[in-house]
Amino acid sequence: MSYPKTGNEVYVSLNLSNTMLTGIGKGTVTRETVSVDYLKKLFAEYGVIVSAKPSQRALLERVNKTYDLGLEIPEKLNLFQLSEQHRRLVVVNVAGLRRKEGSLMPEYTEEELDEATFTFVKYYVQSKHYDDLVEENRKLRYDLEQEIAWRNRTDS
């Protein structure tokens, strides 16, 4: 499966780190678990850039084999930061594999990979801070209430 190059690609990674979020500045990050069908549509619209260590190739190959995502697996780690242009990150959560000090191991046997389960979490960065969004919502609600009161007024 080949995804488009749009300039607004979605990043895919096996982990989330603070350095990934430093490129956006002040903003709001939303997090949601998403389905494979949703990911396929998202990748088809925006494209995808995979950021993973070469040692994680087997895990990504298993994700491709299991879910037919068609992710291009990089030869070297692509470091990135979310930005105004690249505001979407999908983290592939891996469960059922042994870890060393909390990190995935460089290699797993086929039997171990057979036991792995995967879920997908999308992070989206909005350039507006949550407090600003709350204030904007409060103002819109107030304006709406004023409009409703005006329309429902009775002149005595």
Image (cartoon, rainbow, N blue to C red):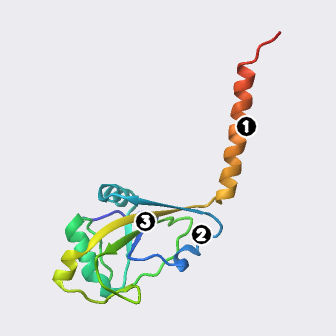
Residue 9, labelled with which disc?
Answer: 3
Look at mark 1 in the image and give the residue it sits on: 142
Q: Quadrant of the N terminus?
A: bottom left
Give the image location of residue 46, x and y in percent: 40, 60
Rendered position, 113 above or below 155: below
Q: Answer with left or right where residue 35 lies relative to residue 148.
A: left
Q: Amino acid at mark 2?
A: Ile
Give the image location of residue 142, x and y in percent: 73, 37
* Nearest the eye: 33 or 83: 33
Q: Answer with left or right where residue 126 lies relative to residue 101.
A: right
Q: Nearer the viewer, mark 2 or mark 3?
A: 2
Q: Amino acid at mark 1?
A: Tyr
User: How far is mark 1 from mark 2, CA to CA?
Assistant: 30 Å
Q: Residues within 10 Å of mark 3 (few under 14, many from 20)?
A: many
Of all residues, the one furthest to the right in this rendering is 156
Give the image location of residue 120, x and y in percent: 36, 65
Rendered position, 137 above or below 61: above
* Residue appearing at x 35%, y 62% in the figure: 4
Residue 45, labelled with which disc?
Answer: none
Q: Secondary structure at mark 1?
A: helix
The quarter holding residue 132 reads: bottom right
Q: Residues within 10 Å of mark 1 (few under 14, many from 20)?
A: few
Q: Secondary structure at mark 3?
A: loop
Look at mark 2 in the image and give the residue it sits on: 24
Q: Answer with left or right where residue 140 lies relative to residue 7.
A: right
Of all residues, the one furthest to the left in this rendering is 111
User: How far is mark 1 from mark 3, CA to CA?
Assistant: 38 Å
Q: Which comes sooner in the sequence, label 1 or label 3?
A: 3
Q: Nearer the viewer, mark 1 or mark 3?
A: 1
